[in-house]
Image (cartoon, rainbow, N blue to C red):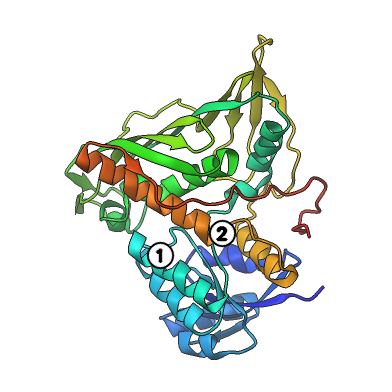
Amino acid sequence: MSKLKVGVIGTGNISGIYFKNGKRFESMEVVACADLDKERALAKAAEYGVRGCTVEELLADKEIQMVINLTVPQAHAAVALQALEAGKHVYSEKPLAATREEGKQVLELARSKGLRVGCAPDTFLGGGIQTCIKLVEDGWIGRPVGATAFMMGGGPEGWHPNPEFFYKPGGGPLFDMGPYYLTALVSLLGPISRVTGSAGISFPERVATSAERFGQIIKVETPTHIASVLDFASGPIATLLTSFDVKGGSVLPRIELYGSEGTMQVPDPNTFGGKVRVRRFDSEEWSDIPLTHGKSENARGVGAADMAKAILTGRSHRASGEMAYHVLEAMFGILDASEQGTHYAMHSTCQRPAPFPLGLMDHSLGE
């Protein structure tokens, strides 16, 4: 089959896996890359055998039909809008945008031009969570009634070379890691109808201890411990706790899903594989479930490849802009609810993405 020609904008650290996996999947071919720092783009282009150019040159290239947007989060919307104005489909790293308003602009422009928007995270397309979706659909735990999800850590200032942005508005554990958890939950349970939560800053200042920034004082400008409740339109109620304030470690599971006939342990949603375990109501033991689907290694970029396949065949793509906006609205809604002491009713919705069929080759994306 033909491959969609793709250009990458943003050639930072994360771009490497997109270039590698761009050669792995059947539906797309990365042919060019660009960056505000043209020298960095040229170096990355030489490393992966593609053409390096400026952003303007990439957007003007009529051969390129889709842009993979790997810029910093604050630039996601601006670059997506540029790509859409140039007549190109766009797939962005998470989050879709830095504000709800920007996210709406991206989706509205895409609709007006008949173009597609996709967005990471795409870890829900890996073998771990796809196996969980299959088990839920096959009734292994009965009717889903609830879930818990935990991302508990001490913050990135101990290891990250530039940790400041994690503590500014648009950062924090909810916006940094929340998209993985919320996207996994939506892929399992469908869209969210309302949210509430409490959010706080436990430590007004952080001290960097990484080698690059050792001793630097970081002012905290966004909540770092957020406890939230999510009501799903299909009925289940979930608890999501995200924190950078857990200094002594945690043994809480990543995600557990509770059903009328059993419980499922869902793998870390920041990975593509992981262990799936089920305990039914009539059993005294947990059962380890073999993964039913492939793509359980680092398949980052599979969402972009699936979108490329969908463009070529006319079907819907799975890591959709609508789902990414729904997750973005939920995160802002949790903070709004905390500030206002109320529930936040979701305005957006989305389709639960279709699962991958069984039996696909690791490079294949289905029809």
Rendering coords of residue 257 (x, y %): 56, 28
Q: Specify whether 12 is left or right of 167.
A: right
Q: Quadrant of the C terminus?
A: bottom right
Choose between 293 and 157: the one closer to the eye.
Answer: 293
Q: Which residue does the image show at 27% across and 41% down from the upper left?
A: 337
x then y, percent, for residue 104:
40, 65
Please, what secondary structure does the residue beneath circle 1 have?
A: helix
**For mark 2, what is the residue?**
320
Residue located at (55% from left, 83% from top): 87
Taking the image as shown, residue 70 lies to the left or right of residue 123, namely left
Taking depth in this image into account, of 114 and 161 the one nearest to the observer is 114
Q: Position of residue 251 (x, y in %)?
A: 45, 25
Decide: is 92 above or below 213. below
In this view, the residue in front, 277 or 281, is 281
Mark 1 crowd level (few <14, some 14–19, many ≥20, 10 Å Cα): some
On the rendered structure, is 233 left or right of 274?
left
Residue 22 occupies quadrant: bottom right
Residue at 58% from the left image edge and 89% from the top image edge: 61
Q: Which mark is residue 104?
A: 1
